[in-house]
């Protein structure tokens, strides 16, 4: 938040300390070599800094946002063309995020995290594989025990609110 | 705003979030999400799950100079490439494929026209223009076919598809889509394999038109 609002280098350094090693671990797990993994970490963290003004904490979690940037970057590196991305929603400039929404989303993300951590080890491993990009859409749909329903239902409240907000924005 | 009733299957949205969908399908998903708040919300849910996995990954030690290098680069100027915007009925991701220009339609007979957006060993993506009330030749597919309505509507054996609706047709479906009355039906269609037609003439034309 401080990175977003005040271009705060100290806050960015903290974010770096928390996420950069996890990002590297995440990228290494996808089979990328160590040197290239660090190159991706560097680019992703720079993108976080540069696009901080596009981050809306009432709609997204920091980790979800960084996950998305990291996957986009990794995929673009392996393709000639950049990956098709949805249109961005226009945000009203200078609107303060609603604190209760930010908190609500955090609570739901925490519940989702807990739900995923309480899965059986095989299921948890499958979730990891799916979001690390190791499963095709066919594999995701045919492998029983991949609790996609859990993911959606745990953040149902957030989804309903998001739907409501998005309708207002149109 | 019309109500969208045919959405992206969960497994496909999760695969899109993780980046494992073939490019032609990823284009259709990005386009549908640009038109559909429900699927945008679901996609963000998958990003949250992806974020949980990211935070759950064992931290790896970084080179000693990586942080200093990144901090040094914060003030460097950078090119912010503007993303293509929607133009008329064509959402941003489609405009990106069209390189910002209107589609150049090629006739396929019977008033049906197409514009090929991409074609590779991963499959193909194209825009289809079907005059109101017109049928598209009976065809099956060797793989999956995703069809997203951008304007007008079509119906086939499986139901009615209005603007914003997404049809997911697997190789078991032999269907004859018929465009609804009113505006011509304009669709974004993607396959992960070439289409096959059941009548002779379109089959002969298939290599020529890459349909």
Image (cartoon, coloured by chain):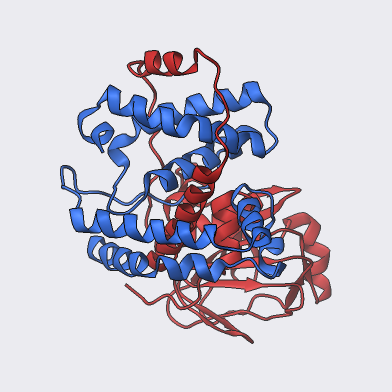
Lateral position of residue B117 relative to residue A89, left or right: right
Please, is residue B138 above or below residue A69 in the view? below
Residue in the image at 49% along x and 63% along y: A115
In the picture, which quadrant includes the C terminus of chain B?
bottom right
- In the image shown, does B61 or A137 lie closer to the viewer? B61
Q: What number of labels is visible?
A: 0
Q: Give the red chain's letter.
A: B
Q: Is residue B107 left or right of residue B42?
A: right
Q: Is residue B147 visible?
A: yes
Note whether A170 is above or below A28 in the view shown: below
Horizontal and vertical percent position of residue A25: 59, 34
Q: Nearer the viewer, residue B137 or B83?
A: B83
Image quarter hosting the N terminus of chain B: bottom left
Q: Residue at x 58, y 50 (%)?
A: B18
Q: Nearer the viewer, residue A92 or B53?
A: B53
Q: Which chain is blue?
A: A
Residue A46 location (% of width, % of height): 42, 26
Q: Nearer the viewer, residue A147 or A43?
A: A147
Q: Position of residue B47 (x, y in %)?
A: 47, 52
Asked if residue B90 shows in the view, the reply is no
Q: Residue A111: horizontal and vertical position, in percent? A: 41, 61
Question: In the rendered view, would you say B85 is above or below B151?
Answer: above
Indicate whether B183 appears above or below B96: below
> Which quadrant of the view contains residue B170?
bottom right
């Amino acid at each position: 938040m401080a990175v977003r609002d005040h271009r705060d280098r100290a806050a960015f350094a903290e974010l770096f300390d928390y996420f950069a090693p996890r990002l590297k671990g995440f990228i290494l797990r996808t089979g990328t070599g160590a040197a290239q993994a660090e190159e991706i970490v560097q680019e992703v963290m720079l993108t976080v800094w540069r696009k901080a003004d596009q981050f809306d904490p009432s709609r997204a979690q920091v980790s979800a946002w960084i996950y998305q940037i990291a996957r986009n970057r990794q995929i673009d590196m392996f393709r000639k063309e950049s990956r098709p991305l949805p249109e961005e929603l226009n945000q009203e400039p200078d609107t303060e995020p609603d604190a209760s929404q930010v908190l609500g989303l955090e609570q739901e993300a925490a519940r989702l995290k807990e739900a995923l951590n309480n899965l059986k080890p095989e299921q948890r491993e499958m979730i990891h594989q799916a979001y690390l990009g190791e499963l095709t859409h066919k594999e995701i749909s045919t492998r029983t025990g991949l609790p996609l329903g859990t993911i959606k239902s745990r953040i149902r409240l957030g989804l309903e609110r998001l739907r409501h907000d998005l309708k207002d924005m149109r | 705003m019309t109500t969208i009733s045919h959405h992206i299957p969960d497994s496909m949205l999760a695969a899109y979030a993780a980046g494992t969908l073939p490019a032609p399908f990823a284009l259709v998903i990005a386009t549908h999400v640009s038109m559909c708040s429900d699927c945008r919300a679901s996609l963000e849910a998958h990003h949250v799950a992806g974020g949980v996995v990211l935070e759950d990954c064992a931290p790896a030690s970084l080179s000693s100079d990586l942080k200093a290098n990144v901090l040094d680069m914060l003030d460097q100027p950078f090119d912010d490439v503007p993303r293509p915007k929607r133009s008329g009925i064509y959402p941003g991701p489609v405009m990106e494929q069209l390189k910002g220009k209107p589609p150049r339609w090629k006739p396929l007979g019977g008033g049906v026209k197409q514009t090929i957006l991409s074609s590779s060993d991963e499959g193909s993506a194209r825009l289809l223009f079907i005059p109101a009330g017109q049928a598209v030749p009976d065809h099956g597919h060797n793989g999956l076919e995703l069809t997203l309505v951008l304007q007008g509507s079509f119906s086939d054996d499986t139901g009615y598809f209005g603007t914003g609706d997404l049809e997911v047709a697997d190789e078991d479906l032999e269907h004859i889509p018929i465009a609804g009355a009113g505006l011509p039906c304009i669709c974004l269609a993607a396959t992960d394999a070439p289409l096959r037609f059941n009548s002779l003439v379109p089959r002969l034309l298939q290599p020529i038109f890459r349909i």
